[in-house]
Amino acid sequence: GSGAQIGTCGMVTIALSAVGFLSPARRGSLMTAILVFYMLCGCLAGYVSSRLYKSFRGRQWQMCTLLTATAFPGLCFAIFVFFNTILAFFRSTASVPFLDLLIVAAMWCCISIPLVFLGAYFGYKAEALSYPTVTSTIARAIPEPTFFMKPSVGISLAGMVPFAAAYVELFFIMTSLWMDQFYYVFGFTFVVYVILLVTCAEVTVLLCYYQLCAENHRWWWFAFFSSGSTAAYTFIYSFFWFQSLEASKMLITYMLYFGYMFLICSGIFLVTGAVGTLTSLWFIRKIFGTIKVD
């Protein structure tokens, strides 16, 4: 659910920036738009997570909805408040006033969380996804796979292809983000973003198909982590890119850079993981729906 929320927010923001509605030259407009779109997409997050949870016959639906509404935003807000407190202690101009923090917290608690619960309400009211075949209540034994068919190997290698597809654009985005430069090539970013999502979907579907051929029926977390491993490659790349930043040797510099890169990669992990899982679910329902049982 959170991955669908972040992915849709990113898609809308990049698309509006590409056509000229949003511009980084207008100070704060891009960040304000991201916050507004993220909160409005909370309804989608609640709907997707609740309907999938209902389809997988989950019972703790209250916990599922609560985690969807608070887990990732809570992590981001806690880390941001922690870093902002340190910056305020050093009297840095990069620190955010306390009133602005209260406004963001109020927007989260009064708009985003209620929208997630609203979307979850409609998700639980909707019918669960139907399965084309009857599943057994007794899980089949999974045979010992070969080395390259092991799920851990597939997860480790799957993120390499989507990362390679977005590598060049990632370099310019990192330069714009950390070297205080304006970024205007949003049209090309939109194309790369779509290619990234399509590549994640294709790679995950292919790997899930091979796992099913190897009689491994546990595909759901495998699909999520396979496409989500793109974030791990992005985080590893941030270590190499940091060497070209020529930053100061202060501890706070390292904390800010790697702390915010961890949040960015967490968002990438949720987006790519959601795309891979939802695409694999559609693919598996499709192939099992074509089976003719006489």
Image: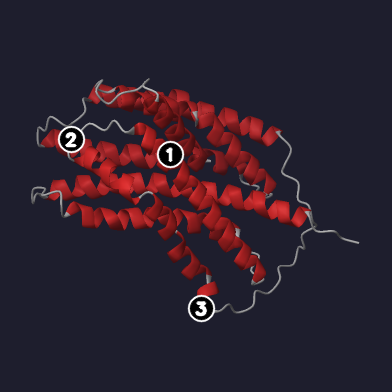
Element under disc 1 = helix
The earlier-in-sequence mark between 3 and 1 is 3
The residue at 45%/23% (across/down) is: 110
Could you say whether the residue bearing mark 2 is in a helix, strand or loop? loop
Residue 173 is situated, as x and y percent measured from the top left of the image, at 28, 41
Tag 3's secondary structure? helix
User: In the rendered image, which quarter is residue 220 located in?
Assistant: bottom right
Residue shown at the point (55%, 73%) measured from the top left: 149
Q: In 3D space, how far apart are the residues under numbered discs 2 and 1 (Cα atoms)?
A: 24 Å
Name which quarter of the figure residue 92 lies in: top left
Q: How crowded is mark 2: few (under 14 residues within 10 Å), some or many (20 or more)?
A: few
What residue type is disc 2 on? Asp
Q: In this view, does 2 lie above or below 160?
A: above
Type of amino acid at the residue the image marks with label 3: Phe
- Residue 267: x percent and y percent? 40, 44
Where the C terminus falls, by quadrant? bottom right
For badge 1, the amino acid type reads Val
Alpha carbon separation for disc pair 2 and 3? 45 Å
In the image, which disc is placed on residue 147? 3
Q: Mark 2, mark 1: which one is toward the viewer?
A: 1
Is 192 situated above or below 133? above
Task: Give the percent coordinates (x, y) of residue 49.
Answer: 58, 41
